[in-house]
Amino acid sequence: MTKLKKKELSILIPNYNNVCVELVAVLQKQAELLGISYEIIVADDASPFKESVMQNQTINSLPNCRFISKEQNTGSAATRNFLARESQYRWLLFLDCDIVIPDAHFLERYMTDDHKGVVNGGICIVDNSSLNHNLRYLYEKDAEPMHTAEKRQANRYQEFRSTNFLAESTVFESCPFDERFTKSGYEDVLFGKTLKQKHISVSHIDNPVMMTEFESNSNYVNKIERSLRTLQEFRQELRGYSRILTFADGIHISAVRTLIRLWHHIFGSLERRNLCGSRPCLKLFNIYRLGYFLTLPKGD
């Protein structure tokens, strides 16, 4: 085994409506084999699906593992901050609850890495042709070539994502997530900007988690619309860190903006129907997002 450079680890998983017993079991087994001091804490953000909460109680029976069920929903940003306060070790590994660990050396790569500050491991997407009708799968698969460590490192702060990252506890104490973000969407983007403002090192490595499950098309479109409303609310703070915001701000001719809005008013419902249907068009998805964003209140 490669010599470990990190000896202790808190694995922190915010959860909402997911059963993550298998994920925790895989991580617990890897941590045991490394012989490090570790803990795994899952915090459920008041999931309405009570069956998942009941099943996740099994986590408490695993060594060094703990499941906490929060009584009030506060959003993923506040839940990550809560998990950090509950942790005890120097290194904090934050993972989303709906991912899969793709190989047996996932934790080892983090613990042998010699970067300081924040380390982002990235994501990969399962190959599954039966999901070619799924909008989220098509979108993530299309973007996957941009997920390599080399390309993420080229814009290390703008490309930060909270799905899979390691951070020193002292760094996280000085730079927590902004709890004004009560809905998921762009809280990690602002976190990346704050890391840059505080001159905290961010390194991207190839140590991805795998996405294997994807929400329905209608749920994904609803999620995207919600995140775009969040982007609109925090647009002043997110400038330079959102491609769609940069593109929208770059449209300086008012007649063009008016034309895009008119197009969305006329065709937006038809575009949405396609995106929520069984044959979603990825190119149409980008058009819909821009039109939706520009028609939000105070879109100028």
Image: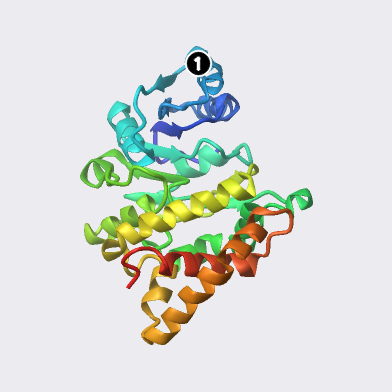
Density class for disc 1 (Cα within 10 Å; few <14, some 14-19, many ≥20) is some
x, y percent for residue 1: 56, 37
Query: How many numbered circles are shown?
Result: 1
Q: Nearer the viewer, residue 44 or 259?
A: 259
Residue 21 in the image: state x and y as whole percent. Answer: 56, 24
Image quarter where the C terminus lies is: bottom left
Q: Is residue 191 above or below residue 49?
A: below
Q: Residue at x 42, y 38 (%)?
A: 93
* Three-letter code, disc 1: Gln
Would residue 212 be found to the left or right of residue 222 on screen? right
In-image side of 66 versus 149 (left or right) = left
User: Taking the image as drawn, is residue 145 in sight?
Assistant: no
Place residue 269 in its image quadrant: bottom right
Query: Residue at the front extreme?
Result: 266
Q: Which residue is mark 1?
A: 57
Quadrant of the image occupied by residue 135:
bottom right
Q: Observer-nearest residue: 271 or 87?
A: 271
Query: Which residue is depicted at the point 28% across and 43% down?
Result: 179
Q: Residue 131's x, y, as percent?
A: 73, 50
Task: Give the left or right position of residue 72, taking residue 60 as reference.
Answer: left
